Image (spheres, grey):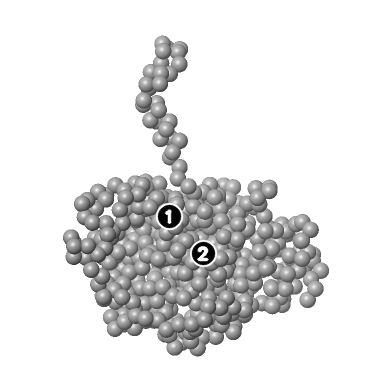
Amino acid sequence: MTVGPRGPVLLQDYYLHEKLSHFNRERIPERVVHAKGSGAFGKFTVTGDITKYTKAKLFSKVGNECRVFVRFSTVGGEKGSADTERDPRGFAVKFYTEEGNWDLVGNNTPVFFIKDPKKFPDFIHTQKRDPKTNLKSATMKWDYWSLNPESLHQVMILMSDRGTPDGYRKMNGYGSHAFSMINKNNERIWVKFHFKTLQGNKTLNAKQAGELKGKNPDYAQQDLIGAIAKGDSPKWSLNIQVMTDEQAKQFKWNPFDVTKIWPHSDFPLMEIGIMELNEIPANYHADVEQSAFAPAHVVDGIGLSPDKMLQGRILAYPDAHRYRLGANYEQIPVNRAVCPVHNYQRDGMMRVDGNSGDSPNYFPNSFDNIMADEKYKEPSQKLDSNTADTFNRNENDDDHYTQPGNLFRKVMTDEEKANTISNIVEEMSGIDGEKREEIIQRQLEHFYKADNEMALSIAKGLNFDFKK
């Protein structure tokens, strides 16, 4: 609405204001980590009887099914970054069970860089952009890793071709942390979750990944939705490792240390279900961008563990969602449970479900009969100590080298070893500045403790005078 055909727009052109005002507000805050992602709906089917381990209704009989939503992602990059960056991949699964939502939130690796949640913000800062140059910095990354040798196991995986998976369909997923299961007799065991891809675990080498970054930065997204669209629904088998409390006490390392694995030879995988993704979300923003996962979301019969990183995540994840999506993020359809939910939470931005009408917002009260159900109470857990001590650790906690060394020597093929060394040399070549030699020397010392020949090969590739 203008003053004549060439005149200015009138203030009363409300439709113009509506369109521009909404446009200015279409973006929500980007995830601090896992910003670039893909997602799909599907189903999970129970194939293994684990009723002796858990009372979760989902696993009450073989053949039970529930709907799932899965979000895959890169970790360190921004929303517009390439899908084939050398980076861990997020692997988050939301099970819509009859008892509520169970979120299994992990990565495509069985371990992580750190085991202390206080370190997480610092670690992520090193994977982002330099505050001065606003560029990614190899110096920041390797400086941090070299000062935190617990990162070596994950660094070895990241620097291998596993650091550049061939899309999302052809990679495994892991809960990474130890969790717990509780059966009908209130007996607890410890578990680790593994999703094994049934498409074959495939990776890209550095050259292939680099070419795809330029040719098709959305490669993994295109591969996932393309396969589902033509009816080639990707599938994964869900497996668990089981450890008793007594085994946990006798384990060589702290079994709740997320930088270490449970050897399959001692704790073999047991298949418990099949997950299939068969539905592309109708709207990316509504479902993929607004999906919110949290390790705190468990159901009766599945619980947490003393893993320190897990303990940090059960606080941080819901807090991040409240920042991005608002206090009522769990009412967004993709996050909403399929079973009735009763609580005394009211009000807040975007409360659009009736706000529980005229029911009371306090407990206890005289107007409803909602009471705590004792059957949901978890059994008590005996702690090893009643002393708060920053340095109270398992005596083998500082062995950061045995498992990375075994990974290199016993698991990797000769080609994988060569590619890993080449990738490390390429990445470490970017270290610069006055601390360059100090950082390289320190990191090579960690590699040397894991495997002598590997460290010497890396030093040779860097043309660096390594002092053993």
Pointer 2 residue = 202
Residue 126, image x and y in percent?
63, 58
Q: Residue furthest top?
A: 4
On screen, residue 386 versus residue 62, left or right, reads: right
- Residue 62 in sight: no
In the figure, is residue 336 to the left or right of 214?
Answer: left
Q: Amino acid at mark 2?
A: Lys
Does 126 sit above or below residue 23? below
Regarding residue 78, the answer to whether it shows in the image is: yes
Label 1: state its secondary structure.
helix
CA neighbours of label 1 inside 10 A, class few (<14), some (14 to 19), many (20+):
many
Counting from the top left corner in percent of width and height, residue 270 is at 39, 78
Density class for disc 2 (Cα within 10 Å; few <14, some 14-19, many ≥20) is some
Q: Earlier in the sequence, mark 2 or mark 1?
A: 2
- The part of the image, by quadrant, that contains residue 272 is bottom left
Whether residue 434 sits left or right of residue 220 in the image: it is right
Mark number displayed over residue 370: none
Say which element carries label 2: loop
* Vertical placement of residue 44 versus 132, above or below: below
* Residue 133 image offset from top left, x and y in percent: 68, 47
Distance from Cα at disc 2 to Cα at disc 1: 32 Å
Q: Nearer the viewer, residue 47 or 285?
A: 285
Q: Image height check: is 466 above or below 291?
A: below
Residue visible at 43% across and 69% down in the picture? 195
Q: Nearer the viewer, residue 365 or 71?
A: 365
Residue drawn at 27 percent across, 72 percent down = 57
Up-down relation of residue 154 to residue 331 (above or below): below
Pick the front one: 403 or 151:
151
Of the two numbered discs 2 and 1 in the rendering, the one whose residue sits closer to the viewer = 1
At which x and y percent is residue 306?
46, 76
* Res. 271 image quadrant: bottom left
